[in-house]
Amino acid sequence: SYELTQPPSVSVSPGQTANITCSGDKLGDKYGCWYQQKPGQSPVLVIYQDNKRPSGIPERFSGSSSGNTATLTIRGTQAMDEGDYYCQAWDSSTAVFGGGTKLTVL
Amino acid sequence: QVTLRESGPALVKPTQTVTLTCTFSGFSLSTFGMCINWVRQPPGQALEWLALIDWDDDKFYNTSLKTRLTISKDTSKNQVVLTMNNMDRVDTATYFCTRMRVSLVGGVFHYYGMDVWGQGTTVTVSS
């Protein structure tokens, strides 16, 4: 079965750039999404189709994908960006989530 | 405004079957490209996709759980129902339903991401 791999944690200083990666076989050939989840809340879609932002998502969130890796980039990271981030892709009409990355802003 | 709300029993016993209902508003599941997914999250763990049903009543399941899951829709009631049989303690989780849209480009479906999530319903499996 298809698998997506994320680093368990990423730390960033306020105002700096955070990069969260997601690896999967030929992931760049599939459309990827990213979700943000804060404690006790439902996930929120922050990037879809690799690099598109839904309305209401700040411009500091961007995405890219190539080869076997997709990357979520958060520029000018703020304390409010702390949370868990999940990548997700579709493979043969089934969805797969990565294991999640805990982003700490300190 | 698009909203989804999950409902179901909070507690089930091992081996029982659980029925979860997603009641939605603000869109029609009859509209081309509309889909509803079920996703679950065990306490402190990652998200896991379970199933999808689309506007055309096509159904797709997590390969590992396929034999235990059934998804269906009642368009007139704006509801999607997921049943999972033979519940086990490892199925203890918060279960979410999500909306997703797809488009057809050059004969290939393009997915737009799960753009609206319900608040989730927590199911505990315990004797």
Image (tube, coloured by chain):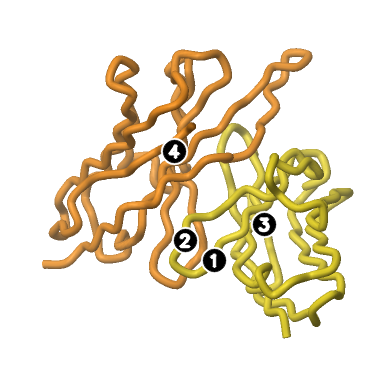
Chain colours: A yellow, B orange
Residue type at mark 2?
Gln
Local crowd at mark 1 within 10 Å, few (<14), some, or many (≥20)? some
SS at circle 3? loop
User: Disc 2, disc 1: CB below 8 Å?
Assistant: yes
Q: Is residue A42 above or below residue B79?
A: below
Q: Which residue matches tag 4?
A: B51
Question: Are discs 4 and 2 both within one chain?
Answer: no
Residue type at mark 3?
Leu
Residue type at mark 1?
Lys
Residue A69 is at least partly visible in this image: no
Question: Does residue B119 appear left or right of residue A28 in this picture?
Answer: left
Question: Are discs 4 and 3 both within one chain?
Answer: no
The quarter of the rendered structure image containing the C terminus of chain B is bottom left
Which residue is nearer to you in this view: A54 or A3?
Answer: A54
Letter of the chain that mark 1 sits on in the rendering: A
Q: Which residue matches tag 1?
A: A38
Residue A4 is marked as 3
